[in-house]
Amino acid sequence: MASSSLSKGKAANTTSEAAYELPWVEKYRPQTLDDVVGNEDTIDRLKVIAREGNCPHIIISGMPGIGKTTSIHCLAHQLLGDAYKEGVLELNASDERGIDVVRNKIKTFAQKKVTLPPGRHKIIILDEADRYAKLRDQEILKRLLEICEMEKVQYNDDGLTALIFTAEGDMRQAINNLQSTHSGFGFISGDNVFKVCDQPHPIVVQAMIRACLKGNVDTAIEKLHELWDQGYSAVDIVVTLFRVAKTFDEMPEYTKLEYIKEIGFTHMRILEGVGTVVQLAGLVARLCKLDAPLLIYLLCEYHESGLSLTLKLSMATHESAVTRRLQTVKNIILVLSGKGGVGKSSVTAQLALSLYASSPTARVGVLDVDLTGPSIPRMLGVDDQGVHQSTSGWVPVYADGAGARLACMSVGFLLKKKGDSVVWRGPKKNGMIRQFLSDRFMVAIVIVTTPQAVALMDVMKCLSFTRAVNLPVLGLIENMSGYACPCCGVVHNVFSTGGGEEMARKEGLQFLGSLPVDTELVSLLDGERQEEEEKETKTDFGLLTSYEKTPSARLFGGILAGVLGGL
């Protein structure tokens, strides 16, 4: 029985040992410095310390899992021998970092008497000794308010905000700036703080950013020179510009990313030694060109109202780069009609040219997704050019050349031959239409019609569609209303007129205006350029010059005013 019981006991112990197995990472952990693999130079230095017994304070840093803690334990074993357990204190500094740890654990361990080999000392290992994170703004503000109350310091909100901004998470810096400002001025205001700290004022930098967002390069350069004339270096200005831009709430996220990228490149060049005002002016110019807002993003489409939304979707769905880029577009106008052949493309071309001429900083984009006969490239005189693909998507063609303020993208650019057709499957089209309606792009509609009753009936269907999907309608344009005499420019009503205006009145729409059949405009948009237009320079947009001489251009002024007023 005893033998049987002993056998059962041995079996139980064997089962227990099999159930618990030491992890291999511990089982094969090096016990001496000779067992450590890699980092030979560091290990050789630790071996010298172990041999001579003169152990200094040591900081070992590196990526996880390379043997930092193990190497120190091996060093401690070789220094202290059998006294290792009593002579070593290991703390996880990421968890045990309070003052109580110093008072209770470290101080007690240091006072404890331990018999060590001659010339050896106790060893304290602080594992995971990560640096403290920067203080939050709320934490600094709370402490500053306590000091102001105790010291009877007068302040305003701008002053406290300036103290937090200049401290950059450093409590000591914030308190020093508070005391210096109080001693020098007796009142804590934003201006006083920045005079003491000698940093570019964020208000001026914010004004510079706002000017860049509007494309107002003159104002932005003026603000830059204001800071430069005050004696601030290029590094001071670009660092403050970065800090203000990354927390600037008046720009969309995509624009903020582009700003930070451009500022970072400029900062790198400045640190390489090119810290001139010209370098900073170049940065301001790039930001103005990058983020001067697009005033209009025009869509010229096929006559079927559903299809007129299609390709715009395929280019701007899913949180893609194009979707993010559209966040910088101020207005999107969809030129729409329920019938083909009413002149949507010509109206779109005129609207684009008129908007382009309305402001020296206006940037206009025309997206032509007429699948059966894309004509916008020909009307804008760029049908012989091609688009290019980049990491950010398709790069459009600029009708104004180096001005880069009138961009054009068309299905026609993607065809190998001008006569090729585009195959577009219905289910895919309908799916993208549904996805477009779920996207939150602010789109306004301009409806184009002709005076004839058939066209007006189809426009009613188009109007019902816009109401069903809850898209705002800016107004209605009656195209081909009359005939503009090429000799005198007088409009003659050879066709029926007024149908579009009457329908707009009944449906509660704004009637934007009427456009006649203009032979000069037809010749111009068909590609018959004037001789002087072919000689246009980089600063001259010949197509615009020729268009402004046509009778239609004079009539379109009222239509443009109605469109801009509706936006």
Image (spheres, grey):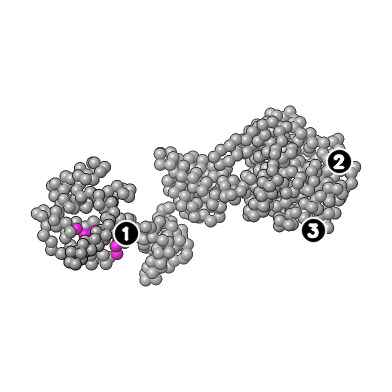
How many marks the image carries: the answer is: 3
Whichever of callouts 1 and 3 sits on the residue coming sooner in the sequence is 1
Residue 557 position within the rendered picture, expressed as x and y whole percent measured from the top left: 76, 46
Residue 94 position within the rendered picture, expressed as x and y whole percent measured from the top left: 32, 59
Which residue lies under the disc numbered 3? Answer: 508
Asked which secondary structure carries label 3, the reply is loop
Mark pair 2, 1: CA separation: 83 Å
- Say left or right for 189 vs 93: right
**Magenta residues, start to end:** 88-98
Asked if residue 93 is among those painted magenta in the image, a careful observer would answer yes
Badge 2 amino acid: Tyr
Asked which secondary structure carries label 1, the reply is loop
Q: Relative to 285, does residue 505 appear above or below in the rendering?
A: below
The structure residue drawn at horizontal position 41% and vertical position 67%, both measured from the top left corner, is: 142
Instruction: Name the residue furthest left.
Output: 118
Whichever of callouts 2 and 3 sits on the residue coming sooner in the sequence is 2
359 vs 19, nearest the viewer:
19
- Say left or right for 105 vs 361: left
222 vs 390, nearest the viewer:
390
Placement of the N terminus among the 4 image quadrants: bottom left
The structure residue drawn at horizontal position 52% and vertical position 46%, both measured from the top left corner, is: 258
The structure residue drawn at horizontal position 73% and vertical position 32%, both measured from the top left corner, is: 419
Which residue lies under the disc numbered 1? Answer: 94
The structure residue drawn at horizontal position 67% and vertical position 39%, both measured from the top left corner, is: 410
Badge 3 amino acid: Gly
Which residue lies under the disc numbered 2? Answer: 483
Asked if residue 96 is among those painted magenta in the image, a careful observer would answer yes
